Amino acid sequence: MSQQKEIMYTIPARFRKMENMHIAFWLMKDISWCMIWRELGIAMIVPTLSVAIWIAWKNRHIKSELAHNLAIVFWITANAYWMISEFFEFDTLTVWKEFTGKHMALIPFTTGAIILLYYYLFQRPKEIEEKHAVTM
């Protein structure tokens, strides 16, 4: 029996530190939202979103990482928009039919979900098929 060698995905320490800092930024943004600290919450959007974009860019050569990191970028975008809509009280204003200002966050949320859906329905099966073809 031959044992297949499992492919390892490693993260350089400096990337890992940046990812950990990203989590701290994100938590601070959401704590600020919860506590209604407008200035800090809005200020934390910049580092949180910037690091998310940087992580997606740095991992763009790995399709699964790119898809998941882009979904995170859109999630943070939606989350930040929702926070701002509440801070400036346009979250309950009607935009169209039953949709309010808060519901506009569905655009980036849905964009992230579509990216993941595409990855899992089309890209991932292709990767599995290519990996299987190589091992045969």
Image (spheres, rainbow, N blue to C red):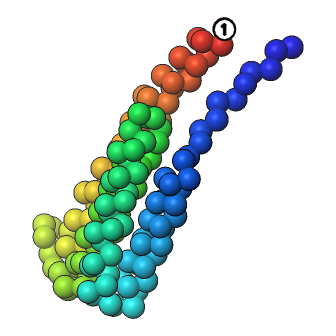
Does the image show residue 78?
Answer: no
Q: Residue lying at the far top in this picture: please name it.
A: 136
Disc 1 residue crowd, few under 14, some 14–19, many 20+, Cα 10 Å = few
Give the secondary structure at mark 1: loop
Residue under the point 51% across and 24% down: 127
Residue under the point 55% across and 18% down: 129
Question: Split into 4 quadrants, where in the image is the C terminus?
Answer: top right
List x then y, in percent, for residue 91. Answer: 22, 79
List x then y, in percent, for residue 134. Answer: 60, 12
Residue under the point 46% across and 60% down: 18
Does the image show residue 126?
Answer: yes
Q: The residue under label 1 is which amino acid type? A: Met
Name the residue nearer the viewer: 21 or 129: 21
Q: Which residue is under mark 1?
A: 136
Residue 12 vertical placement versus 75 (above, below):
above
Q: Quadrant of residue 73?
A: bottom left
117 vs 10, left or right, is left
136 vs 19, left or right, is right
Name the residue nearer the viewer: 88 or 51: 51
Residue under the point 86% across and 14% down: 1
Residue 76 vertical placement versus 126 (above, below):
below
List x then y, in percent, for residue 15. Answer: 49, 53
Name the residue nearer the viewer: 46 or 114: 46
List x then y, in percent, for residue 67. Answer: 41, 42
